[in-house]
Every structure is written in structure tokens, then in C-alpha cells.
Amino acid sequence: MNCNIESRRRSRLYPVIAGVGAGFLSLLFASGSLCAAETAQVAVDTGTTAWMLTSTALVLLMVPGLAMFYGGLVRTKNVLGTMMHSFAAMGIIGVLWVVLGYSMAFGKNVFGGWCGWNPDYFFLKGIDTVITSAGIPEYVFAMFQGKFAIITPALIAGAFAERVSFRGYCLYIALWSIFVYNPLCHWVWAEGGWIFNLGASGAIDFAGGTVVHISAGISGLVAALYLGSRRDYPSTAMHPNNLVMTLMGAGLLWVGWFGFNAGSAVSSGLATAQALTATQVAAAAGATAWLIIEAIHLGKATTLGIVSGILAGLVVITPAAGVVKPAGAIALGMSASLVCYLGLFIKEKLGYDDSLDAFGIHGVAGIFGALALVLFIRQGWWQEAASAAGGHWSLLQQFVVQFKAVAATIVYSVVVSGLIVIVVEKTVGFRMKESAEKSGMDHTLHGEHGYGLINLN
Amino acid sequence: MQLITAIIQPDKLDDVREELVAAGITRITTSRVTGHGQHQDHLDSERLYRGQKVMPNLIPKVRIDIACNDEFVDIAIDAILRSAKHGEGRIGDGKIFVTDIKRCIRIRTEESGCEAI
């Protein structure tokens, strides 16, 4: 998950260590003490480990942040059902990741590189005492990556908010995590992944532009198109029930994103500082740009507008945080707001119901960022890439690499997530019944209501 | 001129509102209310809190107020009766009260009486 060359080199070493563990692996139930003896030589880098532990917690904080962000945007009768989508991902994917997700994503190539597998990672049973070459316990890396696996399917839920059954959603995210997220994560971030090894220095996806945002945005769009609009959309107004909660959620997302991006350096040093700065600057630029656009276009700046701009800026910088300088981050953040703002009008024209703009923000800004970042890459990266390519590496060559990574992500997400939506709808049922949709998710699916305080009981 | 006050189950609000609109009754006021009814063994008011089934002592309902001219009263009542029932003999679907209106004034134009409704 690291695009800067230094940490790429470092991370190239860690399969060696994992490989030593894998020696034991043939014995599926190799005892932990043997592994300990083999791997205890690598010292723990306490500084890096402390930051990665913090980052892991910060990325988890984004999930309740997302629950608040999405929860505030839906109608009162669906507030709990919508927040439940994020929390259910924390539970379901949190388990699946340990059982097989980490292995599928970061194991050695199997099935011709479609995904990875390493029996040592099955239930994480062989990494109890492993320290990676980055100097952090492998548990920390596995848990950090697990948080990305959790938030990605939770992002998709914004596209089909207010109209899916809970059991359908649970099956969908489980299947999506296994068949879409894990393979994509393997392609882009694992040692043997084909996108990781494209071109001179790999496709640049620092913290998940393709793996997280494009895949979630595109899968959301596919699901929204297949499941259809909410009842009476767009003729009936569907107002956010609590923008205050949405604003607080957006604030938590911004804070958590420092872990998401700066943690993706898997170090605690220069690369971390570069990523953190780019993240902060892009989010601020996105927010400012959206305010200006709304002030000019509508005559009023809105709170939902500024949080949309913050998110657009954060999403666009996600693939680029390791390679752009602050001026580039401002340019990316501001143009992302403009592109997303225009995209929302296209959505209105086409009439599909991407309810909370999972595609409109994450998909659009993710695609834009993964492609446009080539314009702003810092000099040092080009030099490293040129020497890796044997003398010369041009902007156009890197753009082609980025384009291949984006196109592969889009095509794969459309096909596989489309199949998953159909399977879920035909088996347990994905779309809620009309009467249930009228009554609301909270009453029908969960037997609770969100705002008891408003009533006198 | 009469005032129809309907107390209904919250999950039926969309159904009732859409049925009223379909019947040509578009001027309504709604509010969240809580109250007591004959709800002691009414399954639908049960709430789940951490697996415990809890029977609230005051249960949430939605109140709809419709002021209309006499010829629309039965239309409105029929629309509510068609749409607010849960069926299967379950209690708690609510009540409809009809009262006379002495005066009605539209603030903007200061019209009064039937035209102001």
C-alpha cells in the first residue's frame, strides 16, 4: 500500500520474512513458538509501530463517522437502518478479514494472480510473533488493512440507502468483500499483484483511490441501477433528517483520513509527513472550492456543500497523497469539487438514484484523482521511476499505467459486483418490499426508532 | 366546515398521506404525538432494546389535522379508513375525530369562511 519508492523497497523485503514463516506452513498447525524463534531477530520500530497503531484506530473512527454522515442524510424513519450499514460492516468484515481476507489480499499469488493465499494468514494463525521488515508487528499491518476492508463496503451503502433489506445487505457486503475487495486489494497492494507491478514503478495508488473509492463508487452505481430508485424518487422531496449529525460525521471522516492516508506510508517519517500534508491541504481546498462554486451558482453556501467539498478533496488525494506537493494537492482538491459538482447535475439529468452520492463523490473523485495525479507528481518520484525504467519514464507512460489500473478496477467492479447484486436479489432478496419501504427501515427491519427523545415517552 | 383529526400509527403515515392526496385532499397538517390507547397487548408498539421486549407506557403516534368543507369530509374519512389499517384484527390503528369549525381565516388575503379552507 505504498507508492513511495523507499517503502516499496522496504515492503519488498517483508515477504522474505513471511516466506520464512511459510516454510513452516506446510505444517498447517506449526506451533507458535517455532515461528517466534524464527522471526524474533527483527527489532520492533517503536516509533513506526506507535503511529501505525494510531492510524489503525483513526481509520476505524471513520466508520462511525460515515454512519453519522450517511445517517444524517436520510429520512427520519431510516436513520438507524442507514447507520446500521456502517456498524454491520465493522462486525461482519471485521471477522471475515481475519478468517480469509488478509490471506486473499496479501498472500502469494494463486489462481493466476486473481487473489493471494497464505495458509499462515488463515485466521492470522501464523503471524502471532512476526515483525515485518518495516519494523511493525504484522498484527498491526493486518489490523490496519482490515479497517480499509471494513469501510469500503460501508461506503457503497450510500448508493442504495433507504431501500434494501438488512439480510440482503449483510450477504452483499460479505460476498463483495470476498470477491471484489480482496482480489482488487491483492492486485494493487500485494507484492505479486499485477497492478502493483505495472510500468516502471507500479500504478500509483497510495491509500486506495482504486481499491477503495473507485471500486465502492462503481459497485454502488451498479447496485443503484439494478435495484432501482426509492419509491417516488425524485418527485417527492427526501430531506436529510439531521444535518448536524452529517457535519459531525464529516469532521470525523477528515480526522480519520489522516490515519487512512498518512498511515498508508507504513512508516513514521518523511513519507508520512508528505502524505499528511497533502491530505490536509486537499481537503481544505475541496471545501473552499465547493463554497465558492455554490456561492456563485446558488448565491448561498450550504453546510451539505462544504462537507461534500471536504469529501471530494479527501477522496481525490487518496491515491495521490504520497506523490504530490501542497500546490498539487490544492489543484487536485479544488478541481475535484468542480468535477463532482458538475457530476451531480449529470445524475439529475440521467435520473438514477445514487441516494447519498457514493458514486457521485467516491467514484467520480476517485477516478479523477487516480488519473489527474500524474500532472502533479514530485520531481523525486520521476527520477526514481526513470532509473527503475532504465533511464526515461514519461508523464504519458505513467498516465497509461494509471488508466489501465482505473479501467481494470471499473470493469472488474461492474462485472463482479453486478453478479453479486443479482445473486443476493434472487436468493435472500435485496430490495425491500414496498410496504416496508413506506414504513421505514427502523420500524420494519430493526424494531427500533432513532429519535425517542422527540416523543414524550 | 369541519375539522378531521386522525390519530394513526407512524408507519402508516406515507400510506395515509398518499391516499389522501390521491383522493384530492392535499391541505393537511401532521405532528408527532404520544399517548395512551387500548395498547396493552398490542404487539406493534413493542420495542426491542438489547433483546429485551419493552412496552412503552406512552406510545408514539402521528396526528393528522384536516380542515375541509362539508362535502369533502366523507372523502377524507374514507381515504384514511382505506389506508391506515394494519389488518388481521390488530388493535392500535388509531381514531378519527370530526368537529365543527366556527371560523376559518386565510392570513395572506384575510378571506374567511368556506373559501379560506
Image: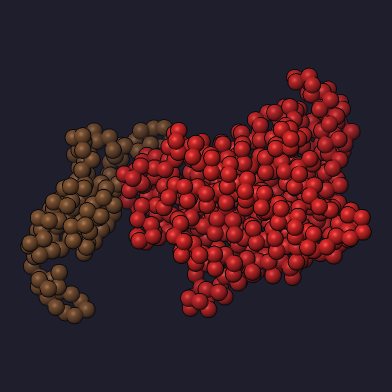
Along the line of sight, the residue nearer the viewer: A105 or A305: A105
Where in the figure is residue A435, as x and y percent of width and height? Answer: 31, 44
Tell me what residue is drawn at x 73 percent, y 59 percent: A320
- Residue A352 visible within the image: yes
Along the line of sight, the residue nearer the viewer: A50 or B84: B84
| Type of colouring | by chain
Residue B106 sits above or below residue A187 on the image: below
From the viewer's perspective, tell me whether residue A432 is left or right of residue A401: left
- Farthest residue, direction bottom: B109
From the viewer's perspective, tell me whether residue A115 is left or right of residue B6: right
Tell me what residue is drawn at x 59 percent, y 69 percent: A338
Q: Which chain is brown?
A: B
Where in the figure is residue A309, as x and y percent of width and height? Answer: 58, 65
From the viewer's perspective, tell me whether residue B72 is left or right of residue A125: left
Tell me what residue is drawn at x 45 percent, y 55 percent: A353
Along the line of sight, the residue nearer the viewer: A293 or A272: A293
Asked where in the image residue A370 lies, by quadrant, the reply is bottom right
Tell me what residue is drawn at x 17 percent, y 47 percent: B82
Q: Quadrant of the C terminus of chain B?
A: bottom left
Where in the figure is residue A147, as x and y percent of width and height? Answer: 64, 43
- Residue A139 visible within the image: no
From the viewer's perspective, tell me whether residue A63 is left or right of residue A118: left
Q: Which chain is red?
A: A
Where in the figure is residue A130, as x and y percent of width and height? Answer: 80, 33
Q: Quadrant of the N terminus of chain B?
A: bottom left
Along the line of sight, the residue nearer the viewer: A27 or A130: A27
Asked where in the image residue B44 lies, by quadrant, the reply is top left
How many tags in the picture? 0
Residue A417 sits above or below residue A405 on the image: above
